[in-house]
Amino acid sequence: MPKRIWQIMIGLLASLQVAQADPREDYHALQDLTAAVAAIAPALDAAEDTALLAYPAIAALMPGPEPLSDLAPLAAMPAAELQLIDLRIALVQLSIYAGTNDQLSVVRAQPGDAPKVIAIRNGTASLAEVKDWIAAQDDAAAMLSDQGLHIPLVVLEGARLTLAAGDELMLNRADGTFLLNLGTLLVDGATIGVAGPENRTVPEYAPFVVTAGSGMAQITGAQITGLGFSKTAAFSGLAVVNKGLYQPIGRSVLTSNVLRDVGAVTFLGTDDAVIRSNLITDARHAGLVLNRANGTDVVGNLITRTQSGSALRVTDGTAGSLITGNLIFANTNTGVQVTRGSRDTHLVRNILWQNGGVGLSIHRSDCTQVTRNVAMENGKKGIELLSSWHAALTDNQIFGNGSAGLLIADQPNGNETLVERNVFVGNRVGLASASAHVLTLRANDFSNQFPRLVDGDLLGEAHQIMNNLTGADEIRLVAGGIEVFGGFSGTCNFERDG
């Protein structure tokens, strides 16, 4: 039953991406789904996770290759060597790429005075082979038990670890375990989770899985639970941190996984990653973070119940992201945030629904294309655009948000923002502005926007919209902007439109 309801919900939401003749019918149809969704969402238990992965039906509406189709096949490798090495060697390698923040917590979480890690080197190993190697050691019981792995596991450069369907990699919290991948990590249908009691020395510690340096991770069909103890990228939960002099050895992908109760899923400094058809639920610090992660495809994911931070955050100069077909639903704060100099971001056909804060926030990020999205019943604004050059907001449905449906503010002098063919229904305010400089309004539908059409700088121009509720005539509004230094240089690339 839950699977069927979710399929109906997603199918209907997807069908509403093209505005109907009467936008009120769209809004009422969406509202009718709220009761069914509210009954299911609190019960996202393990039994229903697989059913919820039917959500990629919405991704099927988006043209484009399957995420694994264009990956080069991996070369055959000999059997790996396994040995114990000093923990400090592994952490030094990690610090080169990820910095030293929170490394002391990792060290303090280890038992004993000379902690070791299992290193995989010079070849490939399966999880079963790792466990067989442990079983042959004199102190096997101290390294592996029914409470999971009691010792960290490191995949060195030039090595590969594979986790297959049915494999379970449980990382013991009390012994400070983690998985560090500097080579290749392949996961296909396995389970990765946390076991054991609280760490005595660092109570907040939870194991993490991080790919770093020139490493790559290809993870599909996995169940991943409980990872991450810090907001630092490397220790946030599940992370790919590709920084340094050398390019990654391959493209990282995260597809068709269930990620529950992780600190965050973080991609830092990696290019051309694919994040597709995942369920990310109950994240503690953020749902998904793209930090200087250029050319990333984020397609057909369901991100829900993020406890703090943004459900999806694009930040720190991330360029060329395609974010399409995602359902960002019932998160505590902002749904999607694009910020801190990110540019050429393409947000197409996403549904931003019942988030506690703003549905979509764009701040100091240029060349953002926002088209054919639904921003509905968010606690604050539906969409906000702040201090950003050359944005285009077209064909969006903005329904029933707790503040302004669309806020445009603090735009640079000399900038013009296009607002075209958007539908406003039942927001507290339809369109608000403050220092928006030049707004071009074209073919927007305010005919069902009550109680207030506009606010802020636009109050004096309300009569223009009142006399033109369906946007038959273009309206060009000029208000004050803000002074900026340097202005905008270069051109926008709106080719990746989904």
Image: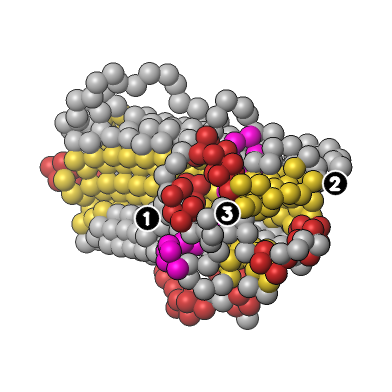
Task: Please provide percent x and percent y for residue 51.
Answer: 65, 71
Q: Residue at x 66, y 58 (%)?
A: 256
Quadrant assignment, res 216:
top right
Q: Is residue 372 left or right of residue 393?
A: right
Q: Which residue is mark 1?
A: 309
Q: Nearer the viewer, residue 48 or 123?
A: 123
* Disc 3 packing (10 Å; few <14; some 14–19; many ≥20): some
Q: Is residue 498 left or right of residue 313?
A: right
**Amino acid at dot 1:** Gly
Q: Residue at x 32, y 40 (%)?
A: 363
**Amino acid at dot 3:** Pro
Q: Which residue is mark 3?
A: 115
The image shows residue 490, relative to residue 255, as above or below, that is above
For residue 347, say whether it is visible. no
Is 338 magenta? The answer is no
Label 2 to label 3: alpha-carbon separation = 26 Å
Q: Earlier in the sequence, mark 2 or mark 1?
A: 2
Q: Nearer the viewer, mark 1 or mark 3?
A: 3
The image shows residue 451, relative to residue 410, as above or below, that is below
Disc number placed over residue 79 in the picture, else none: 2
| Secondary structure of the residue carrying numbered label 1 | loop
Q: Earlier in the sequence, mark 1 or mark 3?
A: 3
Range of residues picked out in magenta = 200-216
Disc number placed over residue 275 in the picture, else none: none
**Amino acid at dot 2:** Ala
Q: Earlier in the sequence, mark 2 or mark 3?
A: 2
